[in-house]
Amino acid sequence: MKKVVITIDGPTGTGKSTTARLLANKLKFNYIDSGFFYRALTYKALQDKLKPNEINKLSEIARKISMEFKEDSVFLSGEDVTESLRSFDITNKVASISKIKQLRKIINEKIKAIEFESGLVIDGKDMGTVVFQNANAKFFLICDFDARVARRQQEFLDLGHKILKDKIAIELKRRDEIDIKQNEGALRKAQDMIEVDTTNMIIEEQVDFLYRKILSLNILNT
């Protein structure tokens, strides 16, 4: 099988990460959640009590970050930090880090340098527009705002965090504004992206839809 890259972009709460991970499993491809690089950087910044304007120190951390994805877990320099990176505190602060141009450039270069075997499924905000512009298939997921809020709340409940919908809605609106307006790697749908409305889909339906679309594009060697 030839090396195939499939990107899945879209706003927070559309089901990108879970869909991408399950799709990768179905295709027997490698999977990367690009957002975890920025979450890891945010995690380290909070540990070192760094502010977003301390660009040089943050850049140094970004260059040194060593991450490994194993099944549903994320390891940072050998430490399982999956639960920490998904916390509400990290979720609430990651946007202020991920919007910084210098840091995005470093992280994107690290992502491009990752070696994979037969194929890669990667999700994020600018994977198809910036990092892998020539990906074999590029998807852009959208979803009704209220449905996104409900999904985010359920994600936090699954992690043992009870967060009010109003609080999640405020944070989502803030994230959307930052993602759309940031100068580097802004969230947008490119012309060659396949838009998928996930509002009325459960995860299994999303995975199946993307899988069937990939088969129809005839990008896999069988």
Image (cartoon, rainbow, N blue to C red):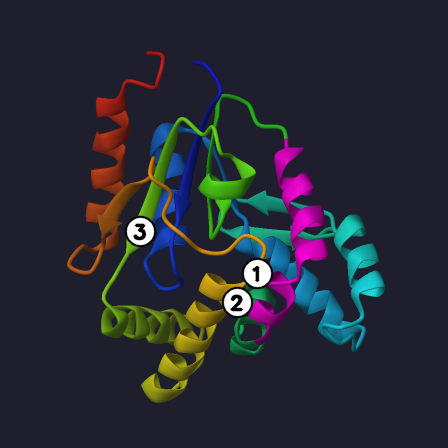
Report crowding for label 3: few under 14, some 14 to 19, many 20 or more residues within 10 A (C-alpha): many
Q: Which residues are magenta?
A: 93-114
SS for tag 3?
strand
Q: Which residue is mark 2?
A: 86
Left or right position of 118 against 22: right
Earlier sequence position, callout 3 versus callout 1: 1
| Residues at circles 1 and 2 in contact by the CB criterion of under 8 Å | yes
Q: In which quadrant of the rendered image does the N terminus lie?
A: top left
Checking the image for residue 141, the label placed there is 3
Of 58 and 66, nearer the camera is 58
Q: Which residue is mark 1?
A: 82
Report crowding for label 1: few under 14, some 14 to 19, many 20 or more residues within 10 A (C-alpha): some
Report crowding for label 2: few under 14, some 14 to 19, many 20 or more residues within 10 A (C-alpha): some
Of 24 and 129, nearer the camera is 129
| Residues at circles 3 and 2 in contact by the CB criterion of under 8 Å | no
SS for tag 2?
loop
Q: Is residue 192 magenta?
A: no
- Is 43 located above or below residue 3 in the figure? below
- Alpha carbons under labels 3 and 1: distance apart: 24 Å
| Residues at circles 3 and 1 in contact by the CB criterion of under 8 Å | no
Left or right position of 189 against 85: left
- Is 72 located above or below residue 130 in the figure? below
Q: Position of residue 186 (x, y in %)?
A: 50, 56
Mark 1 or mark 2, whichever is nearer to me: 2
